Amino acid sequence: MKEGVLIYGCYGYTGKLISELAAKAGMKAVLSGRDEQKVSALAGALNLPHKAFDLNSVEQTSEQIKDFKVVLHCAGPFMYTSDIMANACIKAQTHYLDITGEYQVFENMFALNDKATAAGVMLMSGVGFDVVPSDCLALYLKEKMPNADALDLALYMKGGRISHGTAITVAENLGHPTLLRRNGKLVEVQNGKVLRQVEIDGTRRTGVAISWGDISTAFRSTGIQNITVYNVLPKKVIDSMKMSNYLGFLLRARFVKNFLINRIKQRPAGPNETERQTSTSMVWGEVRAKSGAVYRAMLTLPEGYTLTAHTAVKIAQSVLEKEPPSGAKTPSQVFGKDFILQFEGVSRKDLA
């Protein structure tokens, strides 16, 4: 009988937060990853069992995970690691969760929907800050305006900094255009070109379109055909995004990416505990109908990595306790629009 959760990539910045919270919650978990020394050290500190293995092939990986009810995959960049793990989960009939925000991974998971359904396996990417809160807000707004034709979401972070894993993912995507959802299709636009003003935290701020996971997930959760996700960023960052349009050929070069990744690894791994406790994040959302009607709402949230640990552990625990639906799913499709409200420090507000 399958039981327990395998946390793969347990010793990365976010994986470690998730592993610590899983241990604290008394979850039946086994820690895992590629590096035996790092896995065993963390497992010993948390008094949890462990196993180390690499993602060499679907067949070998399925043998490693076949006894688990669910895998919580935390080892990115997920564009390189998720395909083997997800297909291994389908082969082993083990449910799959991950914490990605990469739209490519979401699209790949939805492409595996039929295989997962046939195997009785649920595939759910984005069980962290990417994309649980925004996905829940998108469904909330859709239910407020069932005839909505367009959805805009905007992200705003107050304090904190990004982890090595997030920064490396950004580096891997440099040189590529921004994607939006238009008339149900993913379309490319120049980086830094699509801007809008949003009022967040009592101030009008400039958001720039980014290729956030909701261009994939919110489309499935709501059926809305036109979706843009913005990130509120400083002007100098937006200007850099615009400049990247002329340097794409260089930014896509492997030697440039490797240089940037090496620089990233020399920096602090992510926000420290004080930064995580004092930082906050917000997700603003707006739906529009062809009639001109508009509805807006906003979520106020804890710091992103802290929230990721809590939502990921909660979703994994839910899968352990109750058999989930099979196929590729979004968080709000399975757990509903109010799922995010149960976590400490989360509130939702309707806006004028």
Image (cartoon, rainbow, N blue to C red):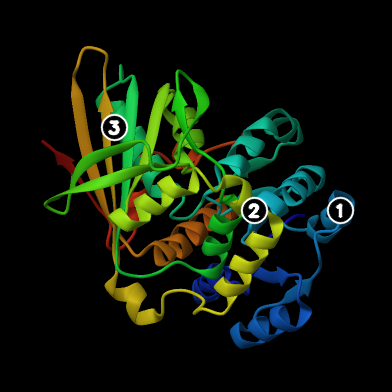
* Position above or below: 292 against 77: above
| Residue topped by disc 1 | 57
Q: In screen coordinates, is 103 left or right of 258?
A: left
Q: Which residue is at the front of the view, 190 or 182?
A: 190
**Secondary-structure class at tag 1:** loop
> In 3D space, how far apart are the residues under numbered discs 1 and 2 (Cα atoms)?
15 Å
Camera-side mark, 1 or 3: 1
Amino acid type for the residue under numbered disc 1: Ser
**Residue 6 in sight:** no
Residue 227 in percent (x, y) is at: 40, 30
Q: Amino acid at mark 2?
A: Phe
The circle drawn on residue 141 is 3
User: Between 177 and 148, which is closer to the camera in this rendering?
Assistant: 177
Of label 1 and label 2, which has the lower sequence position? Answer: 1
Q: Which residue is mark 2?
A: 78
Q: Residue at x 36, y 51 (%)?
A: 239
